[in-house]
Amino acid sequence: MRILLAGGAGYIGSHVALVLLEAGHEVLVVDDYSNSSRTAIGRVENLTERSVEVIDCDLADLTASRAALHGQQFDAVIHLAGLKAVGESVAKPAHYYRTNLTSTLNLLELMADHGVNKLVFSSSATVYAPAAEGVQNLDEDQPAGTGITNPYGWTKAMNEQIIRDIQHSRPELEAVLLRYFNPVGAHPSGRIGEDPSGIPNNLMPFVAQVAIGRRDRLAVFGDQYPTHDGTGVRDYIHVMDLAEGHLAALDHLRAGVATYNLGTGEGQSVFDVVQAFSDASGREIPYEIVAPRPGDVAKAVADPSKANRELNWRAKRTFAEACRDSWAWQSQNPNGYSAG
Ligand code: UDP
């Protein structure tokens, strides 16, 4: 298939592009480079020895997007375009709602224009209600779309609802919502990886930057949670496993909307992450305990059995491999994609 990959130059998008190309698909990337790099796509082209067509355009602008996609043919859309910084979404809610919701509405409109019915959407475990927190492993039937603590998470829940409602009005639409847990790691070559702009919000890139010496120490957000060592527990999934989940979803599209968790089913605490990254890098990771981050839950771990069963997919890589690959990327690219 020829696949329109919206947000294909970003961290997850570049790994999805690589996996799609290796599976023999053609990839058309649409990206506005607001938090991504053209270099990533160049490296994907080098790694796969395939070429990728790239359209530089902001999907929140329907007129510009229509013009940019005029005459283009594609069979399916994988939609990973959007703003994703939780803290920034609290400071700039209107910007987040406008960008993330409008892009999805516009993409659905462009799909109708082009007679395309296949959609894979990048959703997030953050859509689960915080009240589900006591649950051992979150399955897709847990309450979602209530009590979300930040506008970023709301945009994911609202986009899910937009897709369900539009599918209802266009029954031929085949959509899959993929609820990502915590993507980490990089392609094992270390050529592509996560390159956050500014100070990383997420644990793994922050830890990687401490290991390489770009930051002094990690601030551990609380050590009094009801978890095995008091620090927050998350389900960290290797980005290559996550990318392969998109390929599996494409192969299993059928009329309707299906929802799948993409996670490993296993939890790591902040201290587990520090230890594993220190082992992988051979560097010390200095840290200090600070107050919990508002809105954080103690634990969020997937029950990935529905995706295992129905998509015939499972996360295969270990957390130690994720740390090794993340370190390969960080140590070969201490300043990310910028040369400086
Ligand atoms: N965390 C931390 N220090 C940081 C960033 C994150 O202690 O600088 C903790 C956070 O409280 C959570 C875990 O690491 O328990 C994962 O946080 P991240 O922001 O990566 O993912 P999310 O909270 O969105 O699942």
Image: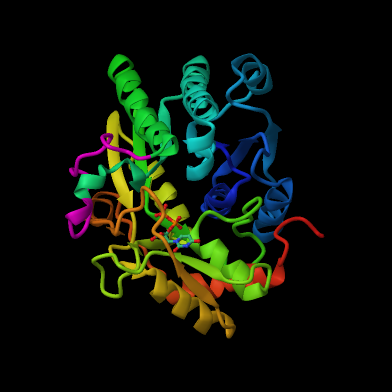
Quarter of the rendered structure image containing ligand 1: bottom left
In the rendered image, residue 209, in percent from the top left (x then y), is placed at 62, 67
Q: Is residue 303 found inside the magenta-colored segment of the image?
A: no
On the rendered structure, is 101 left or right of 263?
A: right
Task: Where is residue 63? Give x, y as percent.
Answer: 63, 14
Q: Nearer the viewer, residue 294 or 173?
A: 294
Name the residue rendered at 69%, 32% in the picture. Answer: 55
Q: Is residue 92 above or below residue 19?
A: above
Whether residue 303 is visible to the viewer of this picture, yes or no, is yes
- For this rendering, which residue is in front, 107 or 58? 58
How is this picture coloured?
rainbow
**In this rendering, does residue 186 appear at all?**
no
Q: Position of residue 268 (x, y in %)?
A: 35, 69
Q: Which quarter shows the C terminus?
A: bottom right
Q: Is residue 130 above or below residue 207?
A: above
Q: How many marks?
A: 0
Residue drawn at 28 percent across, 43 percent down: 128
Q: Quadrant of residue 216?
A: bottom right
The furthest residue to the right = 340
Q: Quadrant of residue 151?
A: top left
- Between 1 and 37, which is closer to the camera in this rendering? 37
Q: Is residue 313 left or right of residue 24?
A: left
Residues in magenta?
A: 133-149
Rendering coords of residue 287 (x, y %): 51, 74
148 in magenta:
yes
For this rendering, which residue is in front, 329 or 282? 282
Tell me the chief SS of the magenta region: loop
Q: Is residue 34 left or right of residue 155?
A: right
Residue 5: quadrant of the picture: top right
Is 179 located above or below residue 314 in the figure?
Answer: above
| Above or below, comparing residue 85 to residue 303 in the picture | above
